[in-house]
Image (cartoon, rainbow, N blue to C red):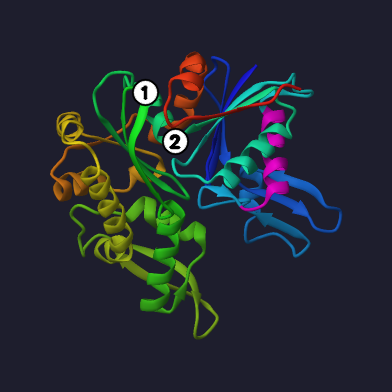
Amino acid sequence: MDIGIDLGTANIIITMNNKGVVLDEPSVIAYNKRTERVVAVGTEAYKMEGRAPEHIAVVHPLQDGVISDDILTQALIREFIFAVAGHPVIKPRIIICVPSLITEVEKRAILDAAMSTGSRKVHLIQEPLAALLGAGIPIGKANGNMVVDIGGGTTDVAIVSMNGIVTARSMKIAGNHFDRSIIRYVQNKYQLLLGSKSAEEIKKTLCNLYDPSEDVMKTVKGRNITRGLPDQCDLSEVELYEALEADIQAITEMIRRVLEETPPELVGDIYENGILLTGGGALLGGLELYLTRTLGVSCRIAKEPTTCVARGTAKAFQRKDVLLDGFERIDGYQQEN
C-alpha cells in the first residue's frame, strides 16, 4: 500500500495507490483534556473551534509548515491513515512532502510521526518538486521551471531543472499569516475583533490584489473591543488590499531574490515558461495578474492548485528510484520493520 501525504499547516491531503486524492481535511484535532482521548479530527474538529467547552482542546498541531506538537501530530496522522486504509494498516510506504528549507530536527519530527503509524518506509519530498510533478511539468529536462507554492504556513519559491532544485527560498508568510494580517488591520482601524474563520472567509470572497475597488464591500461581524458587544463594519477591496499589501510585497521580493540568484540561462527559461502558482494562496483574487505586472514575467495558476502538491506526491512513487538516487535535493528516510 502506497500513501502520499501533503502535511499542510491548514489541510492534510492524502493520496492512496492509484485512487488519487482520498482525503482532504483541516489539520485540526480535538481531544478531551480530562480523559486524554481524541474526540474528533479534521472537519469535525474544525467545526468545534471556538465553540467547544473548556475541557475540550481544539488544536492545530502544525504551525508554519512544521510540527509544533509531536504527540498530537502523530495522533492526527494515525487517525487519518486509519480512515483511508482501515484497521489494521498493513505497513504502507509513505511519502510526505515538506517545505524546501526545513531543518534536520523538523525532518526527524515528521519522520517519527509517520513511522508511529506502523509504516514500512517513509520518504520525504520537497514541496516545490511535488508541486511541479502534480502540475504535470517535465522536470527531468535541462530547462528551468519556477514554482511558487503558497500554503497555509509557508511559501516556497524554487527553480527546478534536471530533476533537482537549483535555487530555493522559503518564508513563513502564507495563508494563516494573511488571516492574522486581516484580523490586525480590522482591529486597529475599526476596533473590531474578528475570528480566524471570519478572516479566512473575507480573504476568499473580497480579495482583489490587481485592481481593488472602493465600491466593492463586504460586511464583517465580530466583537467590539471597547464595548465587548457584537458589532460589524463594512470592509472594501481597497482596505483588504492594504491589510495584505506588506505580506504580498514580501513574497514578491522573495521571488525577485530567487531570480537574482539563478544562472542567466535558467532565468531565460523562466521568462519563456512563466511562473507556476500552487497552493491555496494561489487562489487569492488577482494574485497572478499582480505578480505578472510587478515582475514582468507571466504567471499562471496550476489546475486544482490546492491538491497539486498531493497529486505530485502520489506521482513520486512511480519515480521512487529516481527520487532516492537522482534528485539532488531530495531527502529519503527508510526504516525496515
Task: Provide the residue span drawn in magenta.
Answer: 68-83
Specify whether residue 286 is in view: no
Q: Is residue 237 magenta?
A: no
- Numbered circles on residues, count: 2
The residue pinned by badge 2 equals: 127
The C terminus: image quadrant: top right
* Callout 2: SS: helix
Question: How far across and down, in percent of the image, does residue 45 sit?
Answer: 66, 48
The residue pinned by badge 1 equals: 163
Q: Nearer the viewer, mark 1 or mark 2?
A: 1
Residue lying furthest bottom: 226
Question: How far across and down, in percent of the image, does residue 204 sit?
Answer: 38, 50
**How would you rate the neighbour count of disc 1 (Cα within 10 Å): few for under 14, some for 14-19, many for 20 or more?**
many
* Callout 1: SS: loop
Rendered view: 127 above or below 38: above
| Corner quadrant of residue 161 | top left
